[in-house]
């Protein structure tokens, strides 16, 4: 795994967009995955983005 995780985050966000017409469960799970996989990076570098993403 890339320590910064940016390529993987981009792929996961692409999955969120692909699943936007589902019930929403998949999107929530993907957001949770992003939170747990990249929590240290996101909390340090993208704290506001993280909370906006989880709240949306």
Image (tube, rainbow, N blue to C red):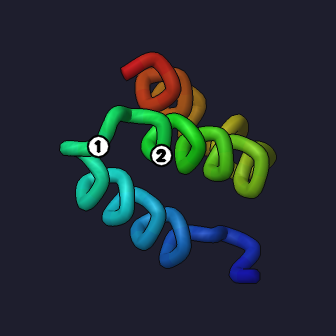
Residues under numbered marks 1 and 2 in contact, where contact means CB atoms less than 8 Å apart: yes
In the image, farthest residue toward the left: 21
Judged left or right of residue 5, residue 51 is: left
Q: Which residue is mark 1?
A: 22
Q: Give the residue at x 48% y 36%.
A: 25
In the image, farthest residue toward the front: 23
Q: Residues within 10 Å of mark 1 (few under 14, many from 20)?
A: few
Q: Give the residue at x 67% y 50%.
A: 33
Tell me where residue 11 appears, x and y as whole percent.
43, 72
In the image, farthest residue toward the top: 55
Judged left or right of residue 26, residue 36 is: right
Quadrant where the image shows the C terminus: top left
Q: Quadrant of residue 22?
A: top left
34 or 47, nearer to the observer: 34
Tell me where residue 40 appears, x and y as whole percent.
80, 47
Vertical order, 20 against 38 (above or below): above
Q: Give the residue at x 38% y 34%.
A: 24
Vertical order, 13 against 8 (above or below): above
Residue 5 is marked as none
2 or 17, nearer to the observer: 17
Q: Residues within 10 Å of mark 2 (few under 14, many from 20)?
A: some
Q: Give the residue at x 55% y 42%.
A: 31
Q: Which residue is mark 2?
A: 26
* Alpha carbon distance from label 1 to label 2: 7 Å
Tell me where residue 3 appears, x and y as whole percent.
75, 74
Q: Disc count in the image?
A: 2
Vertical order, 7 against 27 (above or below): below
Tell me where residue 52 appears, x and y as whole percent.
43, 23
Where disc 2 sits, the SS reads helix
């Amino acid at each position: 795994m890339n320590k910064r995780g940016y390529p993987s985050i981009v792929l996961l966000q692409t999955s969120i967009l692909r699943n936007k017409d589902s019930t929403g469960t998949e999107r929530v799970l993907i957001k949770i995955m992003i939170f747990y996989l990249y929590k240290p990076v996101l909390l340090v570098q993208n704290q506001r983005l993280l909370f906006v993403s989880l709240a949306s």
